[in-house]
Image (cartoon, rainbow, N blue to C red):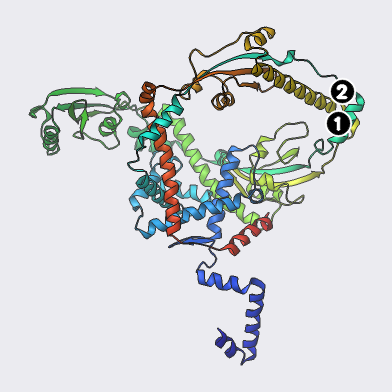
Amino acid sequence: MLALMKSLMNSFVGKIIVMIIIAGMAFWGVDQMFAQIRGGLGSNLAASGSRSIDPQAFDRRVETVIRNINAESEEPMTKSQLQEQGMIDQLFQMEAAKLTLLGFAESIGIHPSADAVVEELKTVDAFKNPLTGALDLDTYRQVLYSSRITQKEYEQQVADDLILKALRNGANAAIYPAKTLSNLQARYIGEEREVAWFLLDATKLPEPDAPTDEEVRAFYDENLESLKQPERRMIDMLKMSSEDFISQVTVTDQEIATIYEASKTERYSEPDTRTYVELYFDTREAARSAFGLLAAGGDSASLQGVANRETKTGRKEGTADKDLAEAMFGPGKQSGALFGPVERGNQWMIARLMSVQPGAVLPLEQVEQEIRDQLSRERAEVMLYEKMEALDRAIGAGYPLSQIGEELNVPIMTFAPVGPQGVTEEGAPMVSLINAGDAFAQAFQIPVGETSNRYDGPTGIFLTSPRKIIEAYTPEFDQIKERVRRNLLRERETNARQTALDQLKERLQSGETTLEVEARKSDTEVESPPAPISRRNAADTGLPTQAIASIFSGKEGEVFTFPSRDGNIVLVLEVLRITPPDETQIASIAPIADTSLITSLQSDLNQALDGEIQAYMKLRTNEAALNAYKASISTDQ
């Protein structure tokens, strides 16, 4: 390096290059520059073996997590919020751990076949043609395009999942718990607890004094921040989905008739009826010999050594044996299809499909509307993808939201001012706006008139633009005086009830009073389950989950209180007696204990396997690239 720099200094241009190199070293850090060169990571965030992850791939993982969170949560989340909560670092650690496992798997030659990947794709309903029910490449590509992931990337994800599954299955094979552990687990599961309770009417507890005007004013002054109204925004929203284009689709009667004729026997007919014969043999060898003769074209009626023969005729749903039903009624199964040999009781059974009686074909008039709807939706999806391309061009050109709506012929909806949670000042949630996900969240981060990034949600594609901003403010005391009074009174009622319940618990646990005495005071009766509660039957008692947890964490004589959601009814419960299982009970519970232990041991073994692989495989991380990615989140949003 020094020789190269010395030779560069011999020319004017070379001197300029050297100055740029030196400036770059000063800015980025010499040690960091050479660390990246030595690590061979380039722009990748992390690498292990031959596997690596770059910022673009990691960003797709982050966006997938956000979509999943927002699909289930009432409060939409953004990347910047993920970063503030430390979840970006957690996701990176998870991806790095996964990368280590994949790098190890490749180093020992574990990789799925192309056929295995295709079989996985066939199980995804979103990739199936709605008319045929089979994997459809066009549908597959369209779904991936709408999810902003390439076919190569998605199939690599599927392959990775199969690799990780293979590692787990190999590690979890043949795990059995030790008898000592099994006995301990059986004692834990079989422990029985006797409890009793009564329902206390909390509305009959002493009421607190009504607050004075001075106390209400003091409460207002002490809670100015909590009484503050959040910033609210009036938001314009564009939502685009395939439903918007169904009315623009044309489906002819001839197209419907063509599809009907091509698929009526498979999709538009009643289930077929099939006749098959079940042949039973006393030994496996006899069954295998018979199977070979049948496979060679032999007649089932002339087979020797058949202990029992049953001829059955029916439909697939009437066959209880799922494996047999698939073999006799599965797609493409024709007369002569064989199944077995399989053990049934103390005999071995083989089955042969004898004949297929097709079901009655439904008339075109009965299924015409179904075919029309399916075709219309399929074509509307195609139009949506075309509109998505036009949408991306309009966004790239920087058009305002109103112009984008005109370009696409999609209406713009305007919502009343809402806060960051999507709720108006009157408390009404704007569900359609909340469903806009990241586009809704971003509407609170951009100025009036600007347009958000595109958000692809489960119900459509969204863009938003704030129309008006109402700054946060605290209402004057006289405006909300009565609301403040209600809040103060509610707080006092809650505190008074809790104090009364705490005192009741103390009296019960000290023996000063009993459940029966307190129940009579509340004009109710003490209740208890018909049998002692164990961890096996606790869910059947109908008690709240919180109460069940307290029962098994409490001691004999301990009392718990569980208010209802509105606080008006309180479950007052006492643990009366704790009885461990005897040896006979432990022996009967042992199989259940083994099952729960195996799950726990498999989890422990997987953690140990991960630790060994991480110690064996060197994980290289690029902190500079990760920090740059996190910085870009704040910049983008």
* Amino acid identity at mark 2: Pro
From the viewer's side, name the closer residue of 541 and 398: 541
* Amino acid identity at mark 1: Phe
Relative to 426, is 615 on the left or the right?
A: left
Q: Residue at x 10, y 31 (%)?
A: 299
From the viewer's side, name the closer residue of 567 and 244: 567
Query: Label for residue 211?
Result: 2
Badge 1 local density, few (<14 within 10 Å), some, or many (20+)?
some
Query: Label for residue 219?
Result: 1
Query: Label for residue 180?
Result: none
Q: Residue at x 19, y 23 (%)?
A: 311
Quadrant, the N terminus: bottom right
Relative to 521, is 105 on the left or the right?
A: left
Residue 239 in percent (x, y) is at: 63, 42
Q: Is residue 526 above or below residue 250?
A: above
> Is residue 434 at all visible to an observer of this figure?
yes
Relative to 412, is 220 on the left or the right?
A: right
Quadrant hosting residue 358: top left
Quadrant, the C terminus: bottom right
Contact, mark 1 vs mark 2 (Cβ under 8 Å): yes
